[in-house]
Amino acid sequence: MKQLGGTPQTVPIEGLDPIAKGAGAAVEIAGRAVAAAKGPLHAIRGTGEQEKMLKNAKSEYADEHEEIATYTAIETLAETLGDTQTAKLARAIRREEQSMASFLERQIPVLTKAVVQAEIPPAQRRKATTRARPKRAATNKAKAKRTPAKR
């Protein structure tokens, strides 16, 4: 702007509601496009199908949280500006993203176990063990039976 000989100015813009709606929709579409574009890239990584699925789930989980942050910011901005429609839309989309993140969070352990089954030979796997309970100290009554009485 300065190179053209002008000075930057802040100008109020009328009718932000439709623009905010459009911006929110554009952010959603862009986010989904990025996620869709990453899919083919993730298809070439990993050694087996299960590992690819795990890596994709982890990437999608991170992406969902980025989208949650974005929609939280949009919601807050809209609420601060009094744009209740945009805030409501951003809140609804954020909740969808949170739901997907929760789903992926539950899937990551399942997919990890599938990778173990598919990629690690049975001889190299350790069986899941329960934690050993620490031995309890003997009770006074039990100690009395084992220790001869002092006279």
Image (cartoon, helix red, strand yellow):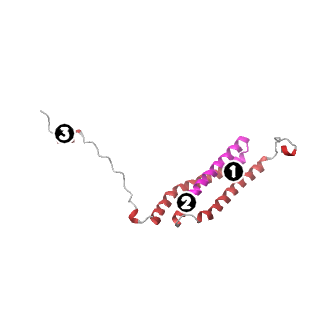
Q: Nearer the viewer, mark 2 or mark 1?
A: 2
Q: Is residue 69 magenta?
A: yes
Between disc 1 and disc 3, whose residue precedes? Answer: 1
Residue at position x 87%, y 46% in the image: 4
> Which image quarter: residue 34?
bottom right
Label 1 neighbour load within 10 Å: few <14, some 14-19, many 20+: some
- The answer for how far apart the CA atoms under marks 1 and 3 are is 72 Å
- Which residue is situated farthest in the right direction here? 5
* Element type where label 1 sits in the image: helix
Residue at position x 33%, y 50% in the image: 132
Between disc 2 and disc 1, whose residue precedes? Answer: 2
Residue at position x 71%, y 41% in the image: 80
* Element type where label 3 sits in the image: helix
Q: Position of residue 60 (x, y in %)?
A: 59, 57
Magenta segment's dominant SS is helix
- Which residue is situated farthest in the top direction here? 151
- Disc 1 residue type (three-letter): Leu
Q: Which residues are magenta?
A: 58-87
